[in-house]
Image (cartoon, grey):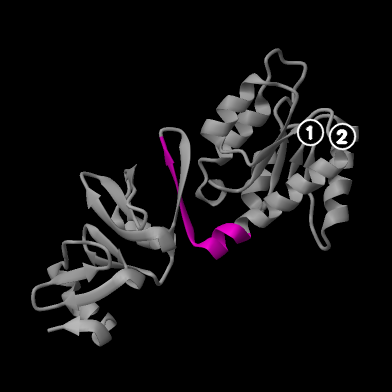
């Protein structure tokens, strides 16, 4: 989806995208009319948005307001957004709050635009192949690769990700159940209501004493009573009974 009030620029950007990809559908808009509805009725893989759409309105930032709105939709929380701008101040807000992928500054270079679009279109595949979790915390976008998670525990409505490099990332307002669902990865296994362990780092599962030994961790991690039978089935090859 391309939103740009200048018709010449809009057509040029559309031609650039179409010249780069086969069988791609480009939705173009020179005003904000029906933009949000179109985004809701279709799956948009990349947004290219001019910050100022209604130039007749002093101080207009309708492009930013549109992205701010779609970021509240789970489907578009991390969809790449490329802003078109000649402004300096809005960049700080867009980076910290809207997590824009990149900027196209006017006047723009066609080859640069192609590089930006090519990278942005690859972004969803990178997320999928890297099995990366993304979170917002205090207006900042954080990421953690599943392969780097040793274990995660829920403490006081916060998830503490204990990484293999010894760093702990704390994310508020997340539960273990939500993390399992968002990760959608066979590597993470929930061992209790408040504990997730990366099965790739499990050394031993002690069902009798209800604990798990994880590589590089000096203490065992507890197994919840209601998870005991399921874990017994899952880790039949490395159990200590």
Tell me the magenta residue range: 125-137
Could you tell whether 53 is left or right of 209 in the image?
Answer: right
At 63% from the left and 54% from the top, the residue drawn is 123
Could you tell whether 91 is left or right of 117 in the image?
Answer: left
At 19% from the left and 70% from the top, the residue drawn is 212
Residue hosting label 1: 4
- Return the x and y of residue 88 as percentages of the image width and height: 67, 21
Task: In the rendered view, tell whether residue 59 sits above or below residue 145.
Answer: above
Count numbered badges in the picture.
2
- Return the x and y of residue 147 as percentages of the image width and height: 43, 63
Q: Nearer the viewer, residue 15 or 86?
A: 86
- Looking at the rendering, which quadrant does residue 100 occupy? top right
Tell me the number on the disc at residue 9. Answer: 2
Q: Quadrant of the C terminus?
A: bottom left
Circle 2: element type: helix
- Looking at the rendering, which quadrant does residue 162 occupy? bottom left
Residue at the extreme left of the image, as rendered:
209
């Amino acid at each position: 989806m391309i939103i740009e009030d200048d018709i010449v620029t809009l057509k040029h950007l559309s031609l650039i995208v179409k010249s780069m990809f086969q069988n791609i559908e480009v939705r173009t808009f020179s005003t904000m009319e029906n933009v949000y509805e179109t985004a809701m009725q279709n799956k948009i893989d990349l947004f290219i948005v001019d910050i100022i759409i209604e130039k007749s309105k002093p101080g207009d930032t309708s492009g930013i307001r549109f992205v701010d709105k779609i970021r509240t939709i789970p489907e578009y929380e991390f969809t790449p957004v490329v802003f078109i701008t000649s402004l300096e101040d809005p960049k700080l807000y867009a980076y910290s709050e809207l997590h824009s992928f990149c900027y196209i500054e006017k006047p723009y270079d066609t080859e640069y635009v192609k590089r930006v679009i090519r990278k942005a279109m690859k972004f969803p595949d990178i997320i999928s192949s890297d099995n990366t979790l993304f979170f917002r915390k205090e207006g900042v976008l954080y990421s953690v690769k599943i392969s780097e998670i040793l274990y995660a525990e829920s403490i006081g409505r916060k998830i503490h990700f204990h990484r293999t490099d010894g760093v702990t990332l704390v994310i508020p307002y997340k539960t273990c159940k939500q993390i399992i669902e968002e990760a959608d990865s066979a590597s993470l296994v929930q061992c209790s209501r408040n504990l997730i362990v990366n099965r790739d780092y499990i050394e031993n599962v002690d069902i009798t004493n209800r604990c798990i030994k994880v590589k590089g961790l000096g203490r065992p991690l507890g197994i919840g009573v209601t998870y005991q039978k399921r874990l017994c089935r899952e880790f039949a090859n490395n159990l200590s009974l």
